[in-house]
Image: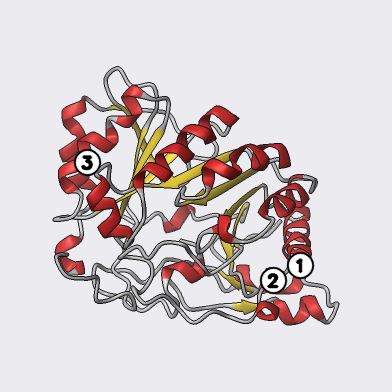
Amino acid sequence: MLVDHFGRRITYLRVSVTDRCNLRCIYCMPQQGVVKKAHQAMMTYEEIARVVGVAAEHGVREVRLTGGEPLVRPDLPVLVSMLAQIPGIEDLSLTTNGILLEGMARELVEAGLQRVNVSLDTLDEDKFRRITRGGRLEQVWRGIETAEASGLKPLKINAVAMRGVNDDELVDLAGLSIVHPWHVRFIELMPLTGQLPRGEGFPGPEEMFMSVAEIMERVSILGLTAAQKNSGCGPASLYQAEGGQGLIGFIPAVSAHFCASCNRLRLTADGNLRPCLLDNIEVNLLSPLRTGEDILPYLERAVKLKPEKHQLNGEAYSAGRSMHEIGG
């Protein structure tokens, strides 16, 4: 088993398959985009599968594919199929902005994908276009419907709560769990540096932040009852609205961190293991992969370097990379 110095067993690996994205969300990627890395600097599907295979041999049971936007990487179902066949992997999921999901959901299911999380911060078309700097909400909505019809259940909606941006829609977003069997999860805005400025008409990042306590207070009008956590729920505290078919989750990434129970490592698209989302420690895997070395010692090293807790304290923190590079 992979166990860190604080007794936490590592059972979850997040795999960023690309740092590219077809949107430019204000809290994730600079408006001008980023410098594209050379093709040879990125992990191949075979290399990713090798890492996941070794991790699975030593206790990793959940794998989530992220980006950037994972669906922009060509032939992603090929990778999904490779990972779905690895012994020990019990849960294979993906986080997406949903733009390309309509055309790919069925193929992903056939390849072995089990679940999908869709990032959706607003139900307003104009606001969606502003937050994503050009995205079309109707594409995401069709993708969500296709994903559900294809069997990617339970479908989860991830919403970053932002004061002055979408705080007037928190109840409407939570209400999706009443009219649909979907899980809606509210995530605190992480005050990372490197993405500023966020554009005309948006508050500053400090003004945007909303704690989970405040988010819950806004949503409590729906009559929340605590719900039991199941596998795959991650760090979210779960509730059910009155008459709800799905669940509402709250993730206090900043105000009340969940580091004591963190069970994950992150693999960046350029082949670095990151023990903590919000710590700049990385262990390079690409070089040993390409020289044929045993990569288990590198996995073990990353686990041993895992900090007790992240460095967020409500103030801006430089994560070294922008969010799109480390998979969120």
* Residue 169 percent location from the top left of the image: 20, 41
Cα separation, mark 1 vs mark 3, equals 40 Å
Judge by depth and name the residue closer to the eye, 173 or 267.
Answer: 173
Occupied quadrant, residue 240: top left
Q: How many marks?
A: 3
* Amino acid identity at mark 2: Met
Where disc 3 sits, the SS reads helix
* Amino acid identity at mark 1: Glu
- Given contact means CB atoms under 8 Å apart, are the residues at marks 2 and 1 in contact? yes
The answer to whether 194 appears left or right of 222 in the picture is: right
Residue 297: in sight, yes or no? yes
The residue to which callout 2 is attached is 43
Which residue is drawn at the image coordinates 42% and 66% (left, top)? 309
Judge by depth and name the residue closer to the eye, 95 or 188.
Answer: 95
* Amino acid identity at mark 3: Leu
In which quadrant is the N terminus drawn?
bottom right
Which residue is drawn at the image coordinates 45% and 45% (left, top)? 118
Q: Residue furthest right?
A: 292
Label number found at residue 244: none
Cα separation, mark 2 vs mark 3, equals 38 Å
Label number found at residue 47: 1
